[in-house]
Image (cartoon, rainbow, N blue to C red):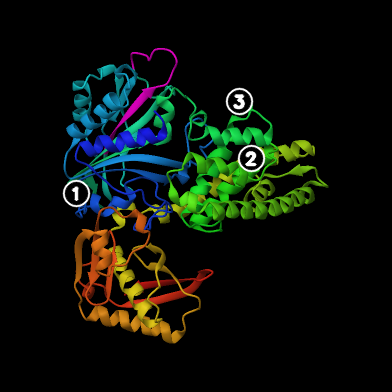
Amino acid sequence: MDRKELIKSYIRFFKSKKHKEIPNVSLIPENDPTVLFTTAGMHPLVPYLLGQKHPLGRRLCDVQKCIRTTDIEEVGDAYHHTFIEMLGNWSLGDYWKKEAINFTFEFLIKVLKIPIEKLAITCFKGDKNSSKDVESAKIWKSLGIPEERIAYLGKDNWWGPAGETGPCGPSTEMFYWVGKNKAPKKFDAKNKKWVEIGNDVLMEYNKTKEGFEKAKQQNIDFGGGVERIAATLNGFEDNYLAETFKPIVNKIEKASKQKYKENQKAMRIISDHVKAAVFIIADGIVPSNTEQGYVLRRLIRRAVRYGRELNVRDSIKVIAEPVFLIYKDYSHLQKNKKNILEELEKEEGRFKSVLEKGLNKFKRLTSKKKKLSGKEAFLLYQSYGFPFEMIHEECKRNKVKFNGKEFEKELKKHQEISRTSRSGKFKSGLSDHSGETTKLHTATHLLLAVLRVVLKNKNIIQKGSNITAERLRFDFNHKSKLTDVEMKKVEELINKKIKEGLAVKREEMDVKTAKKSGAGGIFDEKYGKKVSVYSIDGISKEICAGPHVENTSELGHFKIIKEESVAAGVRRIKAVLE
């Protein structure tokens, strides 16, 4: 079964179980400001997992493109990837464990034709906050999974909350035996021949500041990686030998005149990072030193570095060509191909000039003393993009002593700082639909509407948004800096609308009706058949997933704290509610 057939079979099966298909949305989250990328299919569903009614009902399914930044350092083995396609199905307070596990089992056995003797299961073993998930294990046993093929695990079988508070619960995972020999009778989760192919998250709890409580709405969230499932079903222990990677690997082999078998790690990293970069650029991101742009820059430069190790003769844009053939079904890739390849080429050019500077810096650091400290090596790593392997290679070539342990210490220190700073970005997650962020989200609707009025431009649209409990950040298309007079007018008009106590109304309708009614929105291709439209009486009407207050009088006083440029023709406003 190839990638396309797997996706079609999955969607077809869950539609037969009364699930409605939702669109594959952008990699850049629109309504979850706590993450850089869409990392799972549940991201666009956050308000609905928290209890808001979804326009398409309580049973949903999709295939969603995702970027996993936490896996970048793991890439290089047989099955970790930065870009993945995720199969997902959800119950939003509808069916529960029995139905969810039955659906998963039926799909695996009857649709994918997986022999039951090649399946194993994990369930949550319990802790001080939640009991052992015996219920899920009993359901699996009733379907024919023997007891010795079910293992109880701890943190690996608990999901969430995404932040400090919010929905969470145990999970039950499905594993497939990829070994050539017969699967062992007893399941050992540490045996790497058992590969995880799916995961049912059972969101039955809500974590509050006081502790855990039973959730008012219990949700099911299934996720399964397309690349891993397709490779596994086709008998590949190595994902990079399957159809979603092999054409890219072949291109690298040709460009380097070397074999994959002898250069697995480097070729895996190059093919993974190039593919991820193509998809990120396709969703409007360009390399930069902040947020999504920084991740993109890191991916491209890492691919170039490993290409250099293999003596790849072609530019990175040549390596990227097969991605467009593998994913012909993504029309936005084909439409943006020229721009994507240009951005890859430009960033490669920038990096090569920095690389030359880095090599010169290396020579200056080591010419007299023939020794490189860990701190100096880390400078080359951080400022010039030298990987550990390249530093080691240059030291060996030039007979320079290198303190690798000191470098590792510096790297760990840097990673800890990165994790700490990232925690600010990720601390809220599902729980960030708090009263404060709900108010600020509604305020962005007012801000967009008022900017169109004050700047006398109906074509102003949202180019980006980031909301925390403390402030909103809103990007929009506009050529020039806002004057003090314009900013004052924006504040005054928004505060006038807040004082007027305007109702915020939510309606469900199809996209065509929404457009006819004058509702605004971006990324039209992401919308399903039915959408939520939020109206603020007489001033704003937008397609949006929420969250929102019920009346503008709840917002408080709106104040702009900063207005700046973020890109050519794009301005940014940071504002607070006092």
Three-letter code, disc 3: Lys
- Disc 2 versus disc 3: distance between alpha carbons? 16 Å
Earlier in the chain: of badge 2 and badge 3, it is 3
Q: Which residue was labeled with disc 3?
A: 261
- Mark 2 or 3: in front is 3
- Region of the chain picked out in magenta, as a range: 170-186
Quadrant containing the C terminus in the rendered view: bottom left
Is residue 178 in the magenta section?
yes
| Residue at figure coordinates x 22%, y 19% from the top left | 144
Q: Position of residue 166 (x, y in %)?
A: 27, 50
Q: Secondary structure at mark 1?
A: loop
Earlier in the chain: of badge 3 and badge 1, it is 1
- Mark 1 or 2: in front is 1
Q: Secondary structure at mark 3?
A: helix
* Dots 2, 3 in contact, CB < 8 A: no
Residue 210 visible in the displayed image: no
Q: Which residue was labeled with disc 1?
A: 57
Which picture quadrant has residue 268?
Answer: top right
